Image (spheres, grey):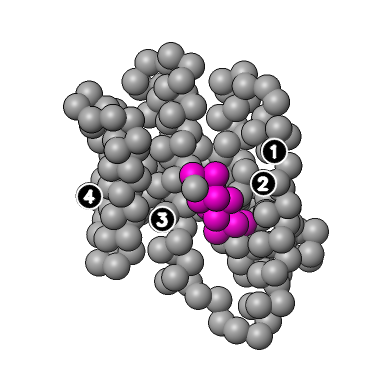
Amino acid sequence: MLHLLEFVGVAVFAVSGALAAGRKKLDFLGVVVIATVTAIGGGTLRDLLLDRHPVFWIAQPGYLYVTLAAALLTVPYTRRFRAPDRSLAYADALGLALFTISGSQIAERLGLSAIIVVLMGTLTGVAGGVLRDVLTAEIPLILRRGRFYATAAIAGIVLYLLLELVIDRTAAALGGMFAIAALRIAAIHWDLTLPVYSVPDEPQNPPPP
Protein backbone atom coordinates (compact mmCIF):
# COMPACT_ATOMS: atom_id res chain seq x y z
CA MET A 1 0.00 0.00 0.00
CA LEU A 2 2.79 2.42 0.93
CA HIS A 3 4.58 1.66 -2.33
CA LEU A 4 1.40 2.41 -4.28
CA LEU A 5 1.00 5.71 -2.44
CA GLU A 6 4.58 6.62 -3.35
CA PHE A 7 3.76 6.14 -7.03
CA VAL A 8 0.67 8.31 -6.60
CA GLY A 9 2.80 11.00 -4.96
CA VAL A 10 5.34 10.85 -7.80
CA ALA A 11 2.52 11.20 -10.33
CA VAL A 12 1.05 14.22 -8.55
CA PHE A 13 4.40 15.98 -8.37
CA ALA A 14 5.03 15.16 -12.05
CA VAL A 15 1.70 16.71 -13.00
CA SER A 16 2.53 19.89 -11.06
CA GLY A 17 5.85 20.05 -12.89
CA ALA A 18 4.19 19.53 -16.27
CA LEU A 19 1.70 22.31 -15.53
CA ALA A 20 4.54 24.65 -14.52
CA ALA A 21 6.28 23.87 -17.82
CA GLY A 22 3.06 24.48 -19.72
CA ARG A 23 2.59 27.89 -18.11
CA LYS A 24 6.08 28.78 -19.38
CA LYS A 25 5.19 27.45 -22.87
CA LEU A 26 7.98 24.86 -22.97
CA ASP A 27 8.12 22.10 -25.57
CA PHE A 28 7.46 18.41 -24.86
CA LEU A 29 11.05 17.79 -23.79
CA GLY A 30 10.85 20.72 -21.40
CA VAL A 31 7.61 19.33 -19.97
CA VAL A 32 9.23 15.94 -19.33
CA VAL A 33 12.37 17.47 -17.80
CA ILE A 34 10.50 19.78 -15.42
CA ALA A 35 8.05 17.03 -14.46
CA THR A 36 10.89 14.60 -13.75
CA VAL A 37 12.87 17.09 -11.69
CA THR A 38 9.76 17.91 -9.66
CA ALA A 39 8.81 14.29 -9.07
CA ILE A 40 12.17 12.75 -8.16
CA GLY A 41 14.44 15.71 -7.42
CA GLY A 42 13.94 15.71 -3.66
CA GLY A 43 14.57 11.99 -3.23
CA THR A 44 17.59 12.17 -5.52
CA LEU A 45 19.22 14.95 -3.51
CA ARG A 46 18.50 13.05 -0.31
CA ASP A 47 20.10 9.86 -1.61
CA LEU A 48 23.16 11.72 -2.87
CA LEU A 49 23.65 13.52 0.44
CA LEU A 50 23.22 10.29 2.38
CA ASP A 51 25.47 8.38 -0.04
CA ARG A 52 22.74 5.83 -0.78
CA HIS A 53 23.50 3.76 -3.86
CA PRO A 54 21.88 3.16 -6.20
CA VAL A 55 19.62 6.23 -6.14
CA PHE A 56 16.02 5.13 -5.56
CA TRP A 57 14.78 5.62 -9.13
CA ILE A 58 17.75 3.71 -10.55
CA ALA A 59 16.98 0.81 -8.23
CA GLN A 60 13.27 1.02 -9.17
CA PRO A 61 12.78 2.47 -12.69
CA GLY A 62 9.03 2.29 -12.16
CA TYR A 63 9.23 5.78 -10.68
CA LEU A 64 10.49 7.08 -14.03
CA TYR A 65 7.72 5.31 -15.96
CA VAL A 66 5.07 6.82 -13.69
CA THR A 67 6.66 10.27 -14.01
CA LEU A 68 6.80 10.07 -17.81
CA ALA A 69 3.22 8.81 -18.09
CA ALA A 70 1.85 11.50 -15.76
CA ALA A 71 3.70 14.25 -17.63
CA LEU A 72 2.62 13.14 -21.09
CA LEU A 73 -1.00 12.56 -20.08
CA THR A 74 -1.17 16.02 -18.56
CA VAL A 75 -0.55 17.65 -21.96
CA PRO A 76 -3.64 16.33 -23.83
CA TYR A 77 -5.80 16.60 -20.71
CA THR A 78 -5.10 20.31 -20.21
CA ARG A 79 -5.73 20.99 -23.91
CA ARG A 80 -9.31 19.78 -23.48
CA PHE A 81 -10.05 20.66 -19.85
CA ARG A 82 -9.05 23.36 -17.41
CA ALA A 83 -6.25 22.30 -15.05
CA PRO A 84 -7.78 21.42 -11.62
CA ASP A 85 -5.58 23.81 -9.62
CA ARG A 86 -7.32 23.46 -6.25
CA SER A 87 -7.69 19.67 -6.50
CA LEU A 88 -4.06 19.36 -7.58
CA ALA A 89 -2.96 21.51 -4.65
CA TYR A 90 -4.77 19.15 -2.26
CA ALA A 91 -3.19 16.12 -3.93
CA ASP A 92 0.19 17.85 -3.74
CA ALA A 93 -0.33 18.22 0.02
CA LEU A 94 -0.80 14.47 0.30
CA GLY A 95 2.31 13.86 -1.80
CA LEU A 96 4.27 16.26 0.39
CA ALA A 97 3.13 14.38 3.50
CA LEU A 98 4.06 11.00 2.12
CA PHE A 99 7.50 11.90 0.77
CA THR A 100 8.45 13.94 3.81
CA ILE A 101 7.81 11.10 6.24
CA SER A 102 9.31 8.43 3.96
CA GLY A 103 12.45 10.54 3.61
CA SER A 104 12.60 10.94 7.36
CA GLN A 105 12.36 7.19 7.87
CA ILE A 106 15.20 6.58 5.41
CA ALA A 107 17.46 8.95 7.35
CA GLU A 108 16.27 7.44 10.62
CA ARG A 109 17.16 3.91 9.53
CA LEU A 110 20.72 5.10 8.94
CA GLY A 111 20.97 6.04 12.62
CA LEU A 112 21.26 9.78 12.00
CA SER A 113 20.47 12.42 14.60
CA ALA A 114 17.02 13.97 14.90
CA ILE A 115 17.99 17.27 13.28
CA ILE A 116 19.37 15.43 10.22
CA VAL A 117 16.20 13.33 10.06
CA VAL A 118 14.16 16.55 9.99
CA LEU A 119 16.42 18.06 7.33
CA MET A 120 16.41 14.97 5.07
CA GLY A 121 12.66 14.51 5.37
CA THR A 122 12.01 18.15 4.52
CA LEU A 123 14.47 17.99 1.62
CA THR A 124 12.72 14.91 0.24
CA GLY A 125 9.34 16.64 0.34
CA VAL A 126 10.16 20.11 -0.94
CA ALA A 127 13.39 20.07 -2.97
CA GLY A 128 11.72 18.86 -6.17
CA GLY A 129 9.38 21.84 -6.10
CA VAL A 130 12.30 24.18 -5.44
CA LEU A 131 14.17 22.82 -8.47
CA ARG A 132 11.00 23.14 -10.58
CA ASP A 133 10.55 26.78 -9.61
CA VAL A 134 14.21 27.64 -10.16
CA LEU A 135 14.23 26.05 -13.62
CA THR A 136 11.03 27.89 -14.59
CA ALA A 137 12.33 31.22 -13.22
CA GLU A 138 9.85 31.47 -10.34
CA ILE A 139 10.42 32.35 -6.70
CA PRO A 140 10.46 28.92 -4.98
CA LEU A 141 7.18 28.15 -3.26
CA ILE A 142 8.87 27.60 0.10
CA LEU A 143 10.27 31.15 -0.07
CA ARG A 144 7.08 32.91 -1.07
CA ARG A 145 5.63 35.15 1.55
CA GLY A 146 4.11 33.33 4.49
CA ARG A 147 3.45 29.97 2.79
CA PHE A 148 2.85 26.86 4.91
CA TYR A 149 4.88 24.36 2.92
CA ALA A 150 8.28 23.53 4.33
CA THR A 151 6.88 24.62 7.70
CA ALA A 152 4.18 21.95 7.45
CA ALA A 153 6.82 19.34 6.56
CA ILE A 154 9.03 20.27 9.51
CA ALA A 155 6.10 20.26 11.95
CA GLY A 156 4.96 16.84 10.72
CA ILE A 157 8.43 15.30 11.10
CA VAL A 158 8.83 16.67 14.62
CA LEU A 159 5.42 15.25 15.54
CA TYR A 160 6.39 11.89 14.00
CA LEU A 161 9.60 11.73 16.06
CA LEU A 162 7.73 12.64 19.24
CA LEU A 163 4.97 10.11 18.61
CA GLU A 164 7.55 7.38 18.10
CA LEU A 165 8.46 7.76 21.77
CA VAL A 166 5.00 6.61 22.85
CA ILE A 167 3.46 4.59 19.98
CA ASP A 168 4.70 2.26 17.25
CA ARG A 169 6.45 3.60 14.15
CA THR A 170 3.62 2.93 11.70
CA ALA A 171 1.08 4.84 13.77
CA ALA A 172 3.58 7.64 14.34
CA ALA A 173 4.22 7.88 10.60
CA LEU A 174 0.50 8.11 9.88
CA GLY A 175 0.19 10.83 12.53
CA GLY A 176 3.03 12.80 10.99
CA MET A 177 1.57 12.46 7.48
CA PHE A 178 -1.84 13.56 8.69
CA ALA A 179 -0.35 16.63 10.38
CA ILE A 180 1.55 17.68 7.24
CA ALA A 181 -1.42 17.21 4.94
CA ALA A 182 -3.82 18.91 7.36
CA LEU A 183 -1.56 21.95 7.82
CA ARG A 184 -0.99 22.33 4.09
CA ILE A 185 -4.67 21.87 3.17
CA ALA A 186 -5.73 24.30 5.91
CA ALA A 187 -3.25 26.85 4.55
CA ILE A 188 -4.68 26.44 1.04
CA HIS A 189 -8.31 26.52 2.15
CA TRP A 190 -8.11 29.42 4.63
CA ASP A 191 -5.08 31.20 3.14
CA LEU A 192 -3.11 30.78 6.35
CA THR A 193 0.32 32.40 6.39
CA LEU A 194 3.30 32.79 8.66
CA PRO A 195 4.19 36.21 10.07
CA VAL A 196 6.20 38.21 7.56
CA TYR A 197 9.47 39.84 8.52
CA SER A 198 9.88 43.27 6.97
CA VAL A 199 12.61 45.86 7.32
CA PRO A 200 11.45 49.41 6.52
CA ASP A 201 13.29 51.25 3.81
CA GLU A 202 15.87 53.81 4.86
CA PRO A 203 14.36 57.30 4.72
CA GLN A 204 15.69 59.39 1.89
CA ASN A 205 17.93 62.20 3.09
CA PRO A 206 16.72 65.57 1.82
CA PRO A 207 19.04 67.15 -0.73
CA PRO A 208 21.39 69.78 0.74
CA PRO A 209 20.22 73.37 0.27
Q: Residue at x 43, y 30 (%)?
A: 104
Q: Earlier in the sequence, mark 4 or mark 2?
A: 2
| Residue at image mark 3 | 93
Tell me the amino acid under the disc marked 3.
Ala
Find the magenta span and give its range.
2-14
Tell me the amino acid under the disc marked 2.
Tyr
Cα gap from disc 4 to disc 2, whole angstroms: 37 Å
| Mark 1 nearby-residue class (10 Å; few <14, some 14–19, many ≥20) | few
Q: Decide if residue 206 is in sight here.
A: no
Tell me the amino acid under the disc marked 4.
Pro
Q: Earlier in the sequence, mark 4 or mark 1?
A: 1
Q: Main secondary structure of the magenta part?
A: helix
| Residue at image mark 2 | 63
Q: Nearer the viewer, mark 2 or mark 3?
A: 2
Q: Nearer the viewer, mark 1 or mark 3?
A: 1
Residue 153 location, quadrant: top left
Q: Secondary structure at mark 1?
A: loop
Q: Nearer the viewer, mark 4 or mark 2?
A: 2
| Residue at image mark 1 | 60
Contact between labelled residues 3 and 1, with CB atoms less than 8 Å apart = no
In the image, is 54 to the left or to the right of 178? Answer: right
| Residue at image mark 4 | 195
| Mark 2 nearby-residue class (10 Å; few <14, some 14–19, many ≥20) | many
